[in-house]
Image (cartoon, rainbow, N blue to C red):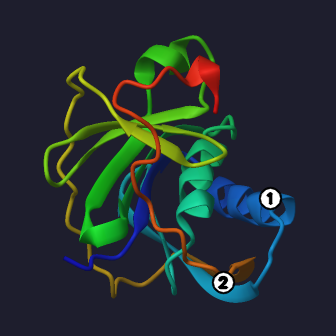
Amino acid sequence: MSKTDRILVRTGDADAIRRRVIDLSGLCTHTRPVERTARITKEAEGLYSLVFSEALAAAQFTNLVGHLLDAPEVTEATGWITGANDVRYELRPDPDREALQETQVLVGVSHLGSFVELYLPECWMCEVSRPLEVFDEPSFDIDADPILEWQVTMDGERHPLLTTTHPKDYDWSDRG
């Protein structure tokens, strides 16, 4: 499978994406700091792809999806990440919880058809019974010229890879 992990972001200000990445880097504890190149390419008016020269650890990637939404300029953020056993996941904020301003849970689907919830910041994940809307991963040109490109320090640890950590339909209010 081996596709590039990326985040698709809807915003009127591409620099807001860069600012949120730098902000998250400053908040993280880097056990193995590694500089990566972050690239933003324009996909359509107000729609941008964010990719890194080297894949981020699952916790950093998923927390970045949630962190991007803390910027008032960002209206949507959806991430595609390859986890353990080459399972590809599409993850986005849960619209039900987002309406309640509870963005600590992402929802999505694997390429195998499993619906999942992911609790931030721990990156805990469970399968869920409730059906979720499925978004096909749009194609994009990995070699497209970036509109923004910069170096950012992130953790060099790639493991553990994204995988199920909790029983199906786990109640995150138990948090453990």
How dense is the environment of label 1, judged by Cα within 10 Å: few (below 14), some, or many (20 and up)? some
Q: Position of residue 155 (x, y in %)?
A: 70, 77
Residue shown at 20%/24% (left/top)?
131
Q: Earlier in the sequence, mark 1 or mark 2?
A: 1
Q: Quadrant of the N terminus?
A: bottom left
Secondary structure, mark 2, is: loop
Q: Position of residue 43 (x, y in %)?
A: 34, 62
Q: Which mark is residue 23?
A: 1
Distance between mark 1 and mark 2 Cα atoms:
17 Å
Quarter location, residue 102: top right
Residue shown at 46%/67% (left/top)?
161
Kindly identify the amino acid type of the residue bearing the numbered disc 2.
Gly
Kindly identify the amino acid type of the residue bearing the numbered disc 1.
Asp
Quarter location, residue 92: top left
Q: Is residue 13 visible?
A: no
Pick whichever, 153 or 117, lies toward us. 117
Is 69 situated above or below 62?
above
Q: Quadrant of the C terminus?
A: top right
Q: Which mark is residue 156?
A: 2
- Name of the residue lying farthest toward the top: 100
Observer-side mark, 1 or 2, equals 2
Q: Is residue 92 visible?
A: yes
For this view, does 31 lie left or right of residue 3? right
Q: Which mark is residue 62?
A: none
Q: Position of residue 91 (x, y in %)?
A: 39, 45
Is 4 situated above or below 93?
below
How dense is the environment of label 2, judged by Cα within 10 Å: few (below 14), some, or many (20 and up)? some
